[in-house]
Image (cartoon, helix red, strand yellow):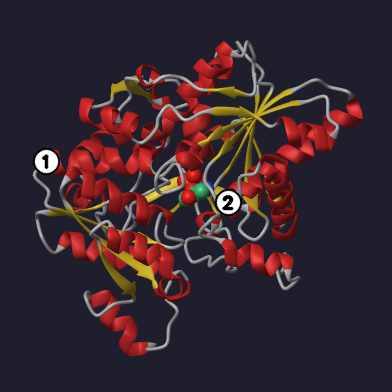
Amino acid sequence: MYKIQLSSDDVPTKWYNINADLPVELPAPKNSKGRDQISTLPDIFVGECLNQEFSTDRYISIPKEVREIYQQIGRPTPLYRATKLEEKLNTPAKIYYKREDTSPTGSHKLNSALAQAYYAREQGIERVTTETGAGQWGSALALACSMMGIDCTVYMVRVSYDQKPFRKGVMQLYNSTIHASPSTNTEVGRKVLEETPDTPGSLGIAISEAVEDALSDDNVRYTLGSVLNHVILHQTVIGQEIKTQLEIAEEEPDTMIACVGGGSNFGGAMFPFMKDKIDGNSDTEFIAVEPSACPTLTQGSYDYDFGDNVGFTPLLKMYTLGHEFVAPSVHAGGLRYHGMNTQVSLLTHEGYITPKAVHQRDVFTAGQMFANCEGIIPAPETCHAIAATIDEARRCKETGEEKTIVMNFSGHGLMDLKGYESFIDGSLENSK
Ligand SMILES: *Cc1c(COP(=O)(O)O)cnc(C)c1O
């Protein structure tokens, strides 16, 4: 079977919450010395999202309206078999990929954006704020807010704002207000601009601006597109659909592969399969792929650290490169985060997840091969998963193993052609 397409009725009715099944208890967030970040969380985040963050219910119902929009935007997404890539690699392995690029905004991010915008509106919130680097999250949230009928303000890192006019255009088309960050809209932004008027901005500054904006008005909340448990929860529609699709194909995954930035597409695709492994009923290998330029899981320490650069957030127990770490500007903007979701971190620490780091040029080489075999141009983030998938398939060729490999195809790269351009003209750096 080359394409396994379910019907709209097969969209899951519940999200799966791995908090119910973790092999050891998740370390709780902590306040940092002399500050109380935990008690301000309800002023920052939407209430239901916070409840879900700490819930231990195994399943959480997807609101009817959210599920209907999942259907409207094309869920369940198809699972494809990469037959041309298998042929090219001459591997005995079977390679399947889950198409999250088919979303209107081109990546998996809309799965959580819709849920977050819905819960905000239900709470009577009139506007949400967020930051965006590469622009995938900002675009998804802009569309979700438009569909749910609330306003959206996006703080877009200055350098991306200037370099990615298309993303800005998408967000404006979906009725969002975009500020190049640092902006004159917040105290944090004004202060930075006064000190360094020519700054390219950073995700850390943009987060601080979005949080300050949310705190300035009781009808406004802040939203995040990755890292937090509730974001992964919303993404578990991906893995539940894959489960149904593999049953139809009569396959069991030997290896599952996804890229990791904050961990949401990885956790969303893998966690529904993780319970069997935790219970000792499967030995599926889960591979998390990150850039060698931002090696959080492979070289970071498992420790308490801030989620942002300035220390607005509580301390979270996670793999981290340190909250002041600034990753080199690789093209996979979505994978440049210093930390990692706490559940993904714990499962890596306990040996349930195998982390792997790949170099930027190998990533684009893999992306180009995939595009030429399968036709779809992958996002630079997704190319990390592809590079690891190709490695695994090549290994299978050497050992003769007929493995079933399932990869999550997190998004397309049609807005990231600058990276491909510099790869093809030879100017792309391998960055570590
Ligand atoms: C944002 C993004 C990622 C990285 O974020 P995760 O939360 O780790 O999934 C990966 N791929 C694409 C296409 C993205 O937009």
- Secondary structure found at label 1: loop
Residue occupying the point 50% across, 52% down: 339
Label 1: how many residues lie within 10 Å, few (<14), some (14-19) or many (20+)?
Answer: few
Residue occupying the point 29% across, 54% down: 142
Residue 66 location (% of width, % of height): 26, 32
The image quadrant that residue 170 belongs to is bottom left
- Disc assigned to residue 18: none
Foreground pick, 78 / 227 = 78
- Disc assigned to residue 123: 1
User: Is the distance from the Cβ of mark 2 to the nearest ligand 1 atom less than 8 Å?
Assistant: yes
| Amino acid type, callout 2 | Glu
The count of marks equals 2
| Amino acid type, callout 1 | Gln
Between label 1 and label 2, give the one nearer the viewer: 2
Residue 210 location (% of width, % of height): 27, 63
Residue occupying the point 33% across, 29% down: 71
- Disc assigned to residue 381: 2
